[in-house]
């Protein structure tokens, strides 16, 4: 996957989010009062290290799922569409093993994506804005090395947040030979999930939606770190992985490969 | 070490049904080890479906399959490393070079030896004549080059069985000749070759055994010599005085004469002495403008078995 131009192009685009954000804030002459505008945006000018967090907040609802759905939708449908799936299976490659390898590949991409975003944010933030000890949401101040550590944790947390969606993508990918179709399906699922999460009438459903805890990475920016939502997220994602992973396994190991 | 069985591929009452329709309606293939086996049939006869079942890509509705004495699909992972295949055309990653494609596919195979990988890939490319184009990305390949790369993929390591679906498709005459020679040399090494093709001349040139399939059933299976013997040798005659010629032929024991335009056609024995017939006709003052023996061809037999016509059967 990492030999493809497309993969590097997506990582580049992900890196651009914090970079463009930082440049836009830097060039704008309006100074935001604390608390105004999107969360964390007001803190960026004071401390460049916030660029990554702000960028993550902006990227999570749509852009990050977009790039991830490209990779997830491509897992099996891409091979089927190219015709290479039959040759891989004849090599021979065990079908279950293929699913696992493909899934892990998408997970690695997601990890690369989130870390790219945080790293690019840290670098551009350090270039354009002053950098110093970071004031957390809870009011405490932490030193730079710890701040960098928390940035890594945010990247890790977001990767975990995406695990369920990746499994959903893998499953949808076994249903079609058109990668774009699979990608669109996953993306729509993430959009619908976020919409449903915002409807108060469906509050009983909210904690079962795979997007529910996505924005809770902010809990890492408290002292002490609030781990309850992190724990719930992990369980939820593992649940999705189990369900959709089994569905993908069931579907893929029994279907005739006619592509 | 168990003895190698007599058959490279064996099926017993193999059926594949899609809903109500049987694409493969109970076939029993027997492909002898070391043979070059031709698999013939019109479009829609169920050949490709059969091949997919042999390779474990599709599941049989009922019936048994044995590939190199291994039950499929139970022992699929044991049998497949010994099998190379080209099925329904080559397929590769267009954004990678030919060489890297082969490396990628070989790496996916758990049973292949990583230390010999590059050497084997290069040897396979050499064998199909792609060494010079190996570094180019596959999206720049012509169909013929992709076909060759597909053959190289089938030859990535020593195989006991090759399943080739239309291997000369898209190749120019030179390439076709080379591939046929390649098949001959592989057969000489003792590899069983299962060749699916529409080109009857190709089957006749290369194969020693044949199975003819139509509408999901095998109509005939056996050695090429056996199948040819079913055909009828014919005498083709063109003369000026037809009625007299008919009498003369009758006196020579040749009856059932049919007329096709100006030609007279009659079924005869294989070792008919044509020169004698000619002599007799000429002695009776009949002008003979054309006289020849037509030996049975596989093509006729094939058309007889499967019916004339270009339509897909189902």
Image (tube, coloured by chain):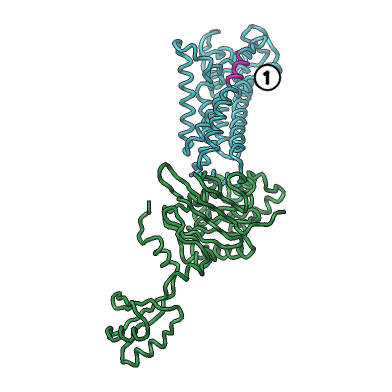
Chain colours: A cyan, B green
Residue A67 visible from this viewpoint: no
Location of residue A139 by image quarter = top right
- Provide the residue span drawn in magenta: A229-236
Residue B268 visible from this viewpoint: yes
Residue depicted at x 44% and y 52%:
B216
Frontmost residue, A18 versus B169: B169
- Above or below B47: residue A214: above
On the image, the x and y values in percent for residue A253 come to 55, 37
Location of residue A240 by image quarter = top right
Frontmost residue, B166 versus A15: B166
Residue depicted at x 28% and y 83%:
B242
Could you tell me which secondary element the residue under label 1 belongs to? helix
| Labels in figure, total | 1
Instruction: Name the side, left or right, on which B89 lies relative to A152.
Output: left
Dot 1, crowdedness within 10 Å: few (<14), some or many (≥20)? some
- Above or below B77: residue A38: above
Chief SS of the magenta region: helix
Q: Is residue A57 magenta?
A: no
Instruction: Name the side, left or right, on which B71 lies relative to A146.
Output: left
Residue that mark 1 sits on:
A148
On the image, the x and y values in percent for residue A223 come to 67, 9
On the image, the x and y values in percent for residue A3 come to 60, 40
Residue farthest along the top direction in this orientation: A139
Q: Quadrant of the N terminus of chain A?
A: top right
């Amino acid at each position: 996957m990492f030999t493809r131009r497309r993969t590097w192009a997506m990582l580049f685009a992900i890196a651009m989010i914090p970079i463009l954000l930082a440049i836009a804030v830097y060039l704008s002459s309006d100074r935001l009062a604390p608390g105004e505008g999107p969360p964390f945006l007001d803190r960026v000018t004071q401390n460049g290290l916030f660029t990554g967090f702000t960028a993550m907040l902006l990227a999570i609802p749509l852009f990050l799922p977009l790039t991830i759905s490209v990779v997830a939708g491509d897992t099996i449908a891409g091979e089927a569409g190219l015709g290479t799936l039959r040759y891989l299976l004849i090599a021979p490659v065990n079908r279950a093993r293929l699913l696992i390898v493909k899934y892990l590949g998408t997970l690695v991409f997601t990890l690369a994506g989130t870390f790219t975003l945080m790293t690019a944010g840290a670098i551009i933030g350090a270039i354009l804005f002053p950098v110093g000890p970071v004031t957390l949401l809870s009011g405490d101040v932490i030193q730079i090395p710890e701040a960098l550590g928390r940035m890594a944790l945010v990247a890790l947390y977001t990767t975990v947040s995406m695990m369920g969606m990746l499994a959903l993508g893998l499953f949808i990918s076994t249903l079609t030979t058109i990668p774009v179709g699979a990608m669109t399906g996953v993306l729509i699922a993430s959009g619908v999930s976020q919409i449903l999460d915002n409807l108060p009438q469906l509050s009983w459903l909210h904690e079962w939606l795979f997007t529910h805890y996505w924005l809770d990475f902010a809990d890492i920016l408290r002292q002490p770190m609030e781990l309850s939502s992190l724990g719930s997220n992990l369980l939820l994602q593992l649940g999705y992985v189990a369900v959709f992973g089994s569905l993908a396994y069931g579907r893929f190991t029994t279907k005739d490969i006619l592509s | 070490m168990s003895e190698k069985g007599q058959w490279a591929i064996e099926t017993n009452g193999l059926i594949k049904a899609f809903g109500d329709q049987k694409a493969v309606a109970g076939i029993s293939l027997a492909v002898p080890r070391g043979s070059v086996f031709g698999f013939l049939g019109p479009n829609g006869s169920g050949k490709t479906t059969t091949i997919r079942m042999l390779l474990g890509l599709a599941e049989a509705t009922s019936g048994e399959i044995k590939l190199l004495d291994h039950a499929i699909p139970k022992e699929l992972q044991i049998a497949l490393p010994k099998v190379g295949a080209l099925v329904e055309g080559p397929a590769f990653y267009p954004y990678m070079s030919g060489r890297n494609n082969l490396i990628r596919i070989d790496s996916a195979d758990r049973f292949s030896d990583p230390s010999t990988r590059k050497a084997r890939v290069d040897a396979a490319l050499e064998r199909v004549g792609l060494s010079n184009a190996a570094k180019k990305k596959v999206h720049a390949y012509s169909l013929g080059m992709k076909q060759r790369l597909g053959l190289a993929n089938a030859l990535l390591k020593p195989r006991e069985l090759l399943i080739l679906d239309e291997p000369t498709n898209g190749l120019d005459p030179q390439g076709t000749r080379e591939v046929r020679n390649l098949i001959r040399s592989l057969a000489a090494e003792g590899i069983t070759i299962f060749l699916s093709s529409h080109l009857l001349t190709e089957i006749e040139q290369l194969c020693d055994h044949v199975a003819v399939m139509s509408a999901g059933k095998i109509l005939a299976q056996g050695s090429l010599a056996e199948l040819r013997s079913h055909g009828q040798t014919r005498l083709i005659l063109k003369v000026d005085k037809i009625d007299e010629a008919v009498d003369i032929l009758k006196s020579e024991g040749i009856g059932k004469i049919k007329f096709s335009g100006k030609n007279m056609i009659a079924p005869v024995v294989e070792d008919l002495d044509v020169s004698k017939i000619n002599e007799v006709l000429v002695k009776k003052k009949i002008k003979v403008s054309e006289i020849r023996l037509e030996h049975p061809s596989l093509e006729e037999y094939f058309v007889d078995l499967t019916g004339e016509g270009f339509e897909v059967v189902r």
